[in-house]
Image: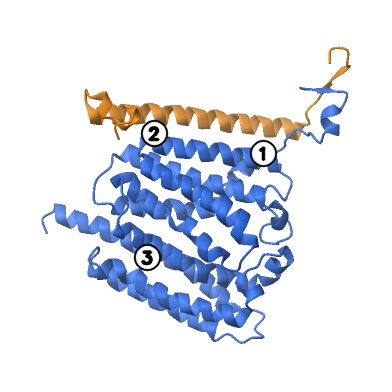
Amino acid sequence: MALAEDGLMEEAGFRMSEATAGDFFALLKPRVMSLVVFTAFVGLVAAPVAINPLLAMIAILAIAIGAGASGALNMWYDADIDAVMTRTAGRPVPAGRVTPGEALSFGLVLSVLSVMTLGVLVNWLSASLLAFTIFFYAVIYTMWLKRWTPQNIVIGGAAGAFPPVIGWAAVTGSVSLESVILFLIIFLWTPPHFWALALFKSDDYARAGIPMMPNVAGQASTRRQIFAYALILAPVGVLPWALGYTTAGYGVVSAVLGAGFVWYAWKVLAMADDDRAMKPAKALFGYSLLYLFAIFAAYLVDCVVGRALMMGGV
Amino acid sequence: MADKKLELVTLTERQQKARRNRSIAIGIALAALVIIFYAATIVRFGHSGASITGSGLLGGG
């Protein structure tokens, strides 16, 4: 039983929440979080020194919660545009299951908690990088770039690219060229991934007034830029082998994956202007997800197998 | 405040279920946090041996 004074609480817009724990979990963008967890884990395992498994688990958990917190802050700020887009209208805030105030508080509390946990229990460099990532995604991308420039996801993509660097920093207490290359792979992957989505969801973005590349520069220009990014991404994906960080096994896998990316991007480039079904764009979007998981999985396997062989004296 | 008439608001069944659901989740999260900090403290102190100041927990890094 809750106490109210002459209905004053209801007059002030107060209502008892019906949000469940599941609604709050949805604020963390669990699908994005899975990508963050995986790439951070690869950065952590790839680091050349060992970390206690418990501390490694805590680092991954803190990074995941920090990423989730930035997602909650994004959903708080973007509730107005989420409400008019079919892809996002069912999110907890626009659907009315969680109030904007609840989402904001939840995001802020988890941001502080994740950064402090990582700092106190692991190290302060990784905590600082996590804090910067949350700030970059919630403030620089969500509040500023997203509604202002078609380069929004190009620059904002840095936020999604930081997790492997944070994972690496959690183990080594430093940032190295190897972790920067992992950052670059995600950073260069982001524009073609999101622009493929923006091509077949351009009506949604137009309704919400978000200046995505297809809505501002047109579909033909977007298709050319997707192809250009694919041409840059493919060789960068092979860089870890070219610089001697991995075996030729990774080199072959990343080269094949990169060639596949260029092939799908080429199909998008060759797409007809009046193609309403946009199957090539949908195919590239699906393949881009596979690409990122596969290239990081290949990197992980290469590190683990390489280390096992060294320990076995092979 | 004192002379204002107070009334009790009865939560709907859905609100009660949601509140119970949230309370359980918060309880689990707090318990997990306690366990994590306890276990991590043991690990960090174990690493630094008798020298507590060598631990990042006390700023040694």
Query: Which structural element holds mark 3?
Result: helix
**Which colouring convention does the figure follow?**
by chain
Q: Amino acid at mark 2?
A: Val
Specify few, some or many for label 2: CA neighbours under 10 Å numbering under 14, 14-19, or 20 or more. some
Specify few, some or many for label 3: CA neighbours under 10 Å numbering under 14, 14-19, or 20 or more. many
Residue occupied by mark 2 = A120
* Between discs 2 and 1, the one toward the N terminus: 1
Q: Amino acid at mark 3?
A: Ile
Q: Which chain, by letter, is orange?
A: B
Chain A: colour as depicted: blue
Q: Nearer the viewer, residue A109 or A305?
A: A109
Q: Nearer the viewer, residue A154 or A61?
A: A154
Q: Position of residue A138 (x, y in %)?
A: 57, 50
Query: Which structural element holds mark 2?
Result: helix
Q: Which mark is residue A295?
A: 3
Q: Nearer the viewer, residue B2 or A234?
A: B2
Q: What is the CA distance from the residue labelled 1 to the residue labelled 3?
A: 37 Å
Q: Amino acid at mark 1?
A: Glu
Query: Which structural element holds mark 1?
Result: helix
Residue A13 occupies which quadrant of the picture? top right
Residue A144 occupies which quadrant of the picture? bottom right
* Residues tagged 3 and 2 counted as in contact (Cβ below 8 A): no
Residue lying at 46% horizontally and 39% vertically, measured from the top left: A115
The C terminus of chain A sits in image quarter: bottom left
